């Protein structure tokens, strides 16, 4: 009796350590092994020891990485936050307040103040949400966790190089839980490749209250990927009645004058000026707004390739410049399909003889072609848009 009790007690206190403790000791072992890999990547012991002196295991970061919600918010809802009246008016204030700095940045990198400020507004609400998570701790935790271990380990190595270079002290190197840093939320590898010291003090400091280096770094990034000053990301257009929606998508490219001959004109009724090759997009399908998209659209996409983000930055920059809201609103109830629903859509289309060339939940050119073919077969506008309404119709 006594002995059984003893065994039970020892099991509870020794053999069943809390999960958190087990993870923390695994984390310590991982750091010890990582030290060798960091050394091989050129990180010296002094940098490594300083960076890891106050290391914390941050299970919250893992939780957030695993529970990232699928982005299914209606575009209308997203835009109402991303390009709110407050954000527009704050953006205009920032353009005035930093006019001198922004003019110098424009002179050096050929990117307009309104565009730089729009990215700043989207990424950190003009510096208000730069992130206060200790960067080395969150990147090390996520690298150790392993779900996207390789990505986060490469970010961690880049972060250590930044420390070794003396751009920032370890205690000041903070960011988002996912490792995006400073006013315009550079990840360490992007920082390594594109950040600039605009103030000339020898440090590329995107963390302090002074946004100079961060804003210049964003402009440098845009320039590197081919930003064309004076040209729009996109222009809202009006479509003619009985328009062939088979013309929408990223594969059909025409000059604005050619689009005008098809009846695709600006919301003022005139042909869109010739800013170069353009594709036609209806992000929420035939019922919502339509845009001619230009090369600068893809440059914004190099920062974050989500359609909603690109339109958000682009439209915010237009609004900061003085433009009004879109003429056609995004439909309020049009949420995006979840991955499982996209797979279901692909499966149902394929079953009906409109093959999507695979069922992977990704709506690429093949899926859009299949959607268009189905839409034509039932007399719907063939906009190729994977909507909830379409899925319901297929059920
Ligand atoms: Ca500097």
Image (cartoon, rainbow, N blue to C red):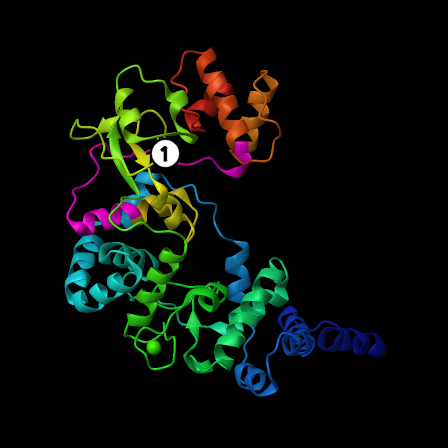
Q: In this view, does 284 lie to the left or right of 263?
A: right
Q: In this view, does 377 lie above or below 152?
A: above
Q: Where is residue 79 in the image (x, y as percent from the top left)?
A: 29, 44
Q: Is 326 contained in the magenta span?
A: yes
Give residue 237's quadrant in the image.
top left
Categorize mark 1 by other alpha carbons within 10 Å: few (<14), some (14-19), many (20+): many
Q: Position of residue 184 (x, y in %)?
A: 35, 63
Q: In this view, does 48 lie to the left or right of 250?
A: right
Q: Quadrant of ligand 1?
A: bottom left
Give residue 272's quadrant in the image.
top left
In-front residue for pair 296/328: 296
* Secondary structure type for disc 1: loop
Quarter of the picture containing the N terminus is bottom right
Magenta range: 314-342
Visible in this render: residue 1?
A: yes
Q: Is residue 324 left or right of residue 334?
A: left
Q: Name the residue under label 1.
A: 283
Q: Is residue 93 above or below residue 255?
A: below
Give residue 257's quadrant in the image.
top left
Q: In this view, does 166 lie to the left or right of 183?
A: right
What residue is at 80 percent from the left and 79 percent from the top?
6
Q: Position of residue 41 (x, y in %)?
A: 63, 74
In-front residue for pair 352/264: 264
């Amino acid at each position: 009796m006594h002995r059984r009790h003893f065994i039970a007690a020892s099991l509870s206190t020794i053999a069943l350590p809390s999960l958190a403790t087990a993870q923390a000791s695994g984390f310590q072992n991982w750091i010890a092994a990582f030290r060798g890999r960091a050394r091989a990547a050129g990180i010296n012991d002094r940098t490594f020891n300083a960076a890891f002196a106050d290391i914390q295991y941050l299970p919250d970061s893992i939780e957030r990485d695993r529970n990232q919600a699928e982005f299914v918010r209606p575009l209308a809802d997203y835009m109402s936050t991303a390009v709110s009246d407050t954000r527009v008016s704050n953006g205009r204030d920032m353009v005035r307040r930093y006019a001198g700095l922004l003019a110098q940045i424009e002179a050096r990198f050929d990117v307009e103040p309104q565009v730089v400020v729009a990215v700043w507004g989207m990424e950190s609400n003009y510096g208000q949400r730069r992130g206060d998570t200790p960067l080395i701790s969150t990147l090390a935790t996520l690298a150790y966790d392993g779900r996207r271990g390789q990505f986060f380990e490469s970010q961690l190595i880049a972060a250590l190089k930044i420390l070794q270079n003396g751009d920032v002290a370890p205690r000041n190197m903070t960011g988002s839980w996912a490792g995006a840093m400073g006013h315009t939320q550079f990840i360490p590898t992007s920082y390594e490749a594109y950040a600039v010291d605009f103030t000339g003090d020898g440090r590329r400091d995107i963390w302090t209250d002074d946004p100079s280096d961060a804003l210049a770094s964003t402009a440098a990034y845009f320039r590197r990927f081919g930003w064309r000053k004076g040209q729009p990301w996109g222009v809202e257009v009006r479509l003619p009645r009985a328009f062939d929606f088979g013309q929408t998508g990223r594969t059909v490219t025409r000059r604005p004058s050619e689009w005008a001959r098809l009846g695709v004109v600006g919301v003022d009724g005139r042909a869109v000026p010739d800013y170069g090759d353009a594709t036609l997009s209806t992000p929420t399908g035939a019922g919502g707004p339509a845009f001619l998209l230009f090369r600068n659209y893809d440059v914004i996409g190099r920062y974050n390739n989500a359609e909603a983000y690109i339109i958000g930055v682009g439209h915010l920059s237009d609004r900061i410049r003085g433009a009004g809201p879109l003429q056609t609103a995004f439909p309020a109830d049009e949420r995006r399909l979840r991955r499982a629903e996209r797979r279901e859509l692909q499966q149902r289309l394929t079953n009906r003889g409109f093959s999507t060339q695979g069922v992977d939940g990704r709506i690429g050119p093949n899926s859009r072609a299949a959607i268009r073919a189905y839409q034509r077969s039932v007399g719907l506008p063939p906009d190729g848009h994977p909507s909830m309404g379409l899925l319901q119709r297929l059920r």
